Amino acid sequence: MRQLIIDTETTGLDPRQGHRIIEFAALELVDRRPTGRDLHLRFDPEREIDAGATEVHGKSWEDLKGEPKFRECAGQIVDFTRGAEWIIHNAPFDIAFLDREFELCELTLCRDVYGGLVDTLALAREAFPGKRNNLDALCERFGVSNAHRTLHGALLDAQLLAEVYLAMTRGQESLTIDMGSAPAAAAATAAGVPAARAPLLVLAPTADELAAHAAYLAALDRESKGRCVWRTAAAAG
């Protein structure tokens, strides 16, 4: 399955008041794994940027003059994102801006481009009701380092959201893992013939993987108020 983690930065809060997109990023996942492909664009919004928006992303109109206009890249965005499942934090905000930009270009709306839409803010509110669920809070909750995020940026935020989304939705969908040969093995066993077993490959975790695992357990321990069973078991062992 092809998924895209999408984020935008804008000149303000409301496209109905003429605010525009100044930055777009889409980070590709295939079968829940980052592929290394992304689409990252900056635009000249053809208007001033609200001071409050500049405080968030650090960009002024002067910084963006000379960048392409959205209409010059709209077809590229549609082509890259078509048919994929879009994953966006606070999706209604970004979709409203993208729909407005597509309308100005006389293109189709987002719902006719994406193959599905996931709002990670809605997922987080359902999983953690009553708690802060912005991207910084979720990074802290799931042990995702965001120390380098001093200002919002579409590509950086998409990269962080990809890690948060994978952590928030991780889970084994089946009790069997990579059991493509299971029917043949079952048939051989039923006939009284021992099924051939593939050699067992044991991979030791790297130092980075151990550190990421420890950070995730620490986040679980905070959320469960010290009742993380994996940490308890490790301490007892």
Image (cartoon, rainbow, N blue to C red):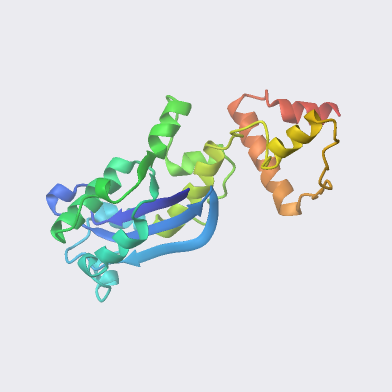
Number of marks present in the image shown? 0
Please tell me in which quadrant of the rendered image residue 125 appears: top left
Q: In this view, does 225 lie to the left or right of 3?
A: right
| Residue in the foreground of this view, choosing between 177 and 7 | 177
Question: In the image, residue 16 lies at what x, y percent?
Answer: 14, 48
Residue at x 18% of width, y 52% of height: 100
| Residue in the foreground of this view, choosing between 199 and 68 | 199
Q: In this view, does 43 lie to the left or right of 173?
A: left
Question: In the image, residue 195 lies at what x, y percent?
Answer: 82, 38
Residue at x 70% of width, y 37% of height: 182
- Placement of 184 over or under 222, stated as above or below: below
Question: In the image, residue 31 lies at what x, y percent?
Answer: 53, 48
| Residue in the foreground of this view, choosing between 96 and 132 | 96
Q: Can residue 147 be seen in this view?
A: no
Q: Can residue 188 be seen in this view?
A: yes
Residue at x 16% of width, y 64% of height: 47
